[in-house]
Amino acid sequence: MTTDVTDTGIRTIRSGFLGAGFMAHVHTRAARAAGAELAVVASSTPDRAVRAAAELGVRRAAADAADLLTDDVDVVHVCTPNATHAALALQALDAGKHVVCEKPLATSLADAQSLAAAAADRGVVAAVPFVYRYHPMVREARARVAAGEIGALITVDCGYLQDWMLLPEDDDWRATSTDGGPSRAFADIGSHLCDLLEFVSGERIVRLTARARTVYPERGGHTVENEDAVTLLVELSSGAIGTLLVSQMAAGRKNALTLELHGTRSSLRFDQERPEELWIGRRDASQHLFRDPQTAHPGVARFSRVPVGHAQGYQDAFNGFIADVHAAIRGDQPDGLPVFADGVRAAQLTEAVLAAAAGGHWVDVPVLLQ
C-alpha cells in the first residue's frame, strides 16, 4: 500500500471504517486528531455509507466491506455489531491491513485466538480500544503500583455501572445473542474493568466466581439472551482478593468506572467520571492528586494532551490510543498499547464469568500463551 508523505517527512496514514454508529464517530474523530486521511467508510447498506461519509467527513463511501478492502488504506477500523467483528477483522487481516477492532474482539475465545494468531502471522498492528488505559491518572496509578508505593496488594474494590438499560422499554441490538453475543454487561463494560484492573495492578485474575442477572426476559418484543448485571469475586496472582460489580441498570450512573486498590502501604482510587484526579489513601492522611505533567511519574507526562486545568476526558483517551496505533504502524512500540492478545484475554475472562455464573462455582483462569 502507498501513503502520502507530509512536508515533515511523516507519512499520512489512510484509514477505512466499517460501521457508521456512535463508535464510528469516536474512531473518526480520533483518527482525524492523529493526522490520518479518512479515506473510506462502509456501513450496513450503500445508502447508509453515503450518509455516513457526509456526516463523518470521509472521502469515499464503499458499497460494502469487500469494496472498502480494495481501497489502498493502511488501517481498517471495525466498528460494527459484536457478532460481526471476527469475520470482518479477519477479512481486513487477509487483505494485509492493520486493524483496530472494537471490543469484544470476538464473541468466542476460539475466534479471538484465531484472530490474534492471524495478526501475528501477518506481522501487522492489531489493536483493541481498551482506551481507559489512556487516562493520564490511570498511567500515574500504574506507575505508582509498579514503583512499590502502595506496597503489597491486599484487596481490590471495582465497579462499572451504567443505567442506559434500566427501563423495560430500553432496547438495543446488544441484548440479542445473534448480534451482541452470549454476554452483554460483562463483555461490553466488564471487559474494560478487568483490563484496567490487570493493567494497573500488574497482576492477573487467576480465579473467579460470578453471579449474573437478567432483569427483564423481553425487550422490544424479543427475548433478552444475555445479562444486565454481573458480580464477581476474584483472586489475583499475588493472592489479593476483590469484588467487581458490573451493571447496565444502575439508576443515575452514566459511566461510573471505578478502580480501587488497597495495599499494605496505601490505597489508590481512580474514577473515570473524575478523570483528572487520583485519590491516594494512607493511614495517617489521604489526598487527591491532580493531573500535572511536571510532577507525574516518568513516562506519564506524554498522556497529558492539554495544559493543566483544561479537563481531559474519554475522547482524549481515545485520541491517545489511536495516536499510539499510528506510532506502532510507523514502527514504534508504544508502552501499554492494547492489542489483540488483550482482546483474547477479555474473551477468556468472559467465558470464565459465564461458566462460573451458570455453574455456581469457582473457575480457574490460567494465563494463556500468546
Image (spheres, rainbow, N blue to C red):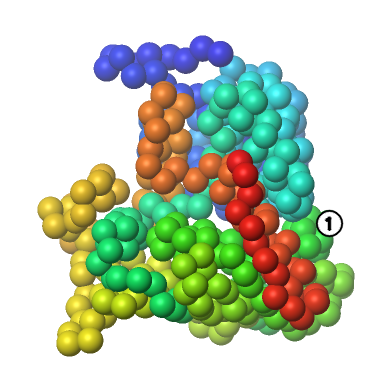
Q: Quadrant of the N terminus?
A: top right
Horizontal and vertical percent position of residue 263: 34, 75
Q: Nearer the viewer, residue 143 or 53?
A: 143
Element assignment for label 1: loop
Residue at 43% x, 14% y: name it.
4
User: Which residue is at a point 83% across and 56% down the rendered structure image?
Assistant: 178
Tell me where residue 360 appears, x and y as whole percent. 76, 80
* Residue 214 visible to an observer of this rendering: no
User: Measuring 69% from the left and 38% from the top, which residue is drawn there?
Assistant: 115
- Crowd class of label 1 (few under 14; some 14 to 19; many from 20; radius 10 Å): some
Residue under circle 1? 178
Tell me if residue 289 comes above or below residue 54 in the rendering. below
Seen in the image, is 358 located left or right of residue 281?
A: right
Residue 302, placed above or below residue 293: above
Write down the quadrant of residue 7 in the picture.
top left
At label 1, which amino acid type do we have? Thr
Residue 122's x, y, as percent? 63, 23
Does residue 300 appear left or right of residue 354 in this picture?
Answer: left
In this rendered view, identify the residue nearer to me: 203 or 35: 203
Please identify the residue farthest to the left as the structure is shown. 294
Q: Which residue occupies the foreground of this view, 219 or 290?
A: 290
Percent from the top left, x then y, of residue 183? 73, 65
